[in-house]
Image: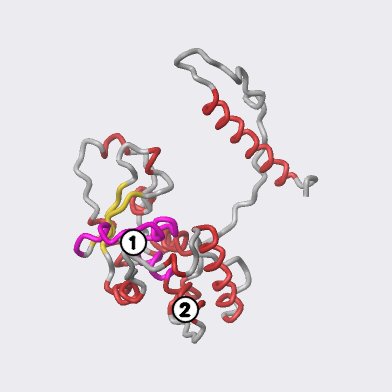
Amino acid sequence: KANKPCSISNYFYKLCKVYKVLMREVNDYDNNIIVIPHNPFSLISVPDNRKKIDKSIPVDVLRKIFNYETTNKRVAFALDVCKISFCLVGINLVDLYNLKKENVKGDLICYERQKTKAKRKDNAYIEIKIPDIIKPILEKHKCNDESGLLLDLREKRKEINSLTAYINHQLNIVSANLHYEDRALTFYSFRHSWATIAANDLKAGIEEVAFALNHVSAHEITKGYIKTDFSSIWDLNQRV
């Protein structure tokens, strides 16, 4: 594997990233305490040879997945979680995993995106209106213990990476049964699919899709002057 260009590129990319994180951790620039004075990778340019993989699911296959019937409880659970994600604008699994009952305010799920909340002034806050189509699924998987969590995802796996692998394994079964083998089917495919349908099938603008996915847009500063209106996401999500 070391002889493959993409593997070498990925290796150096990760090594450079680790080195930068280490410099931030051990160097105290305010007090002029510099343990690591130089980044040896600062002048090295490594080409990115990683291939772009199309993770979205064609609409006809997506419909088959939504209508897929099974008596396998593990597969049914994985499909339910994926349906919830897709219908909540491709919400990430880690955010679903950590949602609490207090995040639900009427028909809205209000939360801060785990992946980027520490990097943004607005804490990556977003409000998503719950479509009627998934209300029964949310009720089915509501958490009944005293943890305050919204969903019972921890009953399957106590750790997020393990849960991701668990769901993806069940999706492999669905993919095989549907003879959908031209690309990998994963939980994250549903977030990509939401974005693809919104942009390509419903002709939503890139800025609108970025806003719906809670990505940082080019107009972040302008948005700081204006009260955020999340209702455009709700309408677009209903159309998707």
Q: Is residue 90 visible?
A: no
Q: Which mark is residue 76?
A: 2
- Tell which of 222 and 110 is nearer to you: 110
Inspect the image, locate mark 1, and give the three-letter code of the amino acid beneath it.
Answer: Ser
Q: The C terminus lies in which quarter of the figure?
A: bottom left
Q: In the image, residue 202 lies at what x, y percent?
A: 36, 63
Q: Which mark is residue 19?
A: none
Q: In the image, residue 5 lies at what x, y percent?
A: 74, 44
Left or right: 21 as drawn, with respect to 31: right
User: Going by the picture, which residue comes out furthest to the front?
Assistant: 146
Determine the residue positioned at 41% across, 60% down: 97
Q: In the image, residue 155 lies at what x, y percent?
A: 44, 69
Q: In the image, residue 157 lies at what x, y percent?
A: 50, 65
- Tell which of 62 and 202 is nearer to you: 62
Nearer mark to the viewer, of 2 and 1: 1
Residue on which disc 1 sits: 147
> Dot 2 lies on which element?
helix
Magenta portion: prevailing SS class: helix
| CB within 8 Å, label 2 to label 1 | no
Per the rendered image, the range of residues in magenta is 81-106
